[in-house]
Image: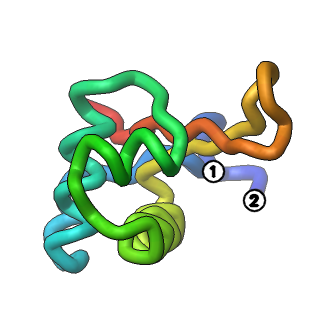
Amino acid sequence: MSVSEPIGTEGGGSWEDVRELPPSAKLVAKVLEYNETMTQGEIAEETLLPARTVRYALSRLDEQNVIDSRFSFSDARKRLYSLSIAD
C-alpha cells in the first residue's frame, strides 16, 4: 500500500466491478447482499448452483475485491463470506 493511498480502500469494490463478471458471480453477490455472512455450502443451497460453480464465482468476486472472507469460529474448516461493496 502506498503512502498516498487512503486507508480502507483496498477491500472496497463496487457494483461496477461486478458488472463484467459471469452470471453466477452476479447471483452470488446478490445473495450475499441480502444475507450478511454465509458459508460456501449455504450459498450453494440458496442459489441452487453446484458447489464448483459457487467456488468459481467466489474466486472471481475475490479477484474484484468485492467480498470478504474469514474463518468460522464455530468450525475452522469453513469460511464465512460477506459482501464488501461500498454503497
For label 1, the residue is 5
Give the secondary structure at mark 1.
Answer: loop
Instruction: From the top left corner, tell me how far across and down residue 69 is, in percent.
Output: 63, 44
Q: Amino acid at mark 2?
A: Ser
Location of residue 32 by image quarter = top left
- Locate the C terminus and report the quarter of the image it occupies: top left
Q: How many marks?
A: 2
Answer with left or right where residue 54 lies relative to residue 74: left
Instruction: From the top left corner, tell me how far across and down residue 33 is, in percent.
Output: 26, 33
Numbered mark located on residue 80 in the image: none
Foreground pick, 49 / 36: 49
| Residue shown at 26% from the left, 42% from the top | 46
| Residue shown at 80% from the left, 22% from the top | 73
The vertical placement of 46 against 74, above or below, is below
Foreground pick, 5 / 50: 50
Mark 1 and mark 2 in contact (Cβ < 8 Å)? yes
Give the secondary structure at mark 2.
Answer: loop
| Residue shown at 48% from the left, 47% from the top | 41
The vertical placement of 28 against 77, above or below, is below
Q: Residues within 10 Å of mark 2 (few under 14, many from 20)?
A: few
Instruction: From the top left corner, tell me how far across and down residue 48 is, in percent.
Output: 22, 56
Instruction: From the top left corner, tell me how far across and down residue 22 is, in percent.
Output: 21, 79
For label 2, the residue is 2
How far apart are labels 2 and 1 at the CA level?
A: 5 Å
Answer with left or right where residue 56 lies relative to residue 16: right
Q: Amino acid at mark 1?
A: Glu
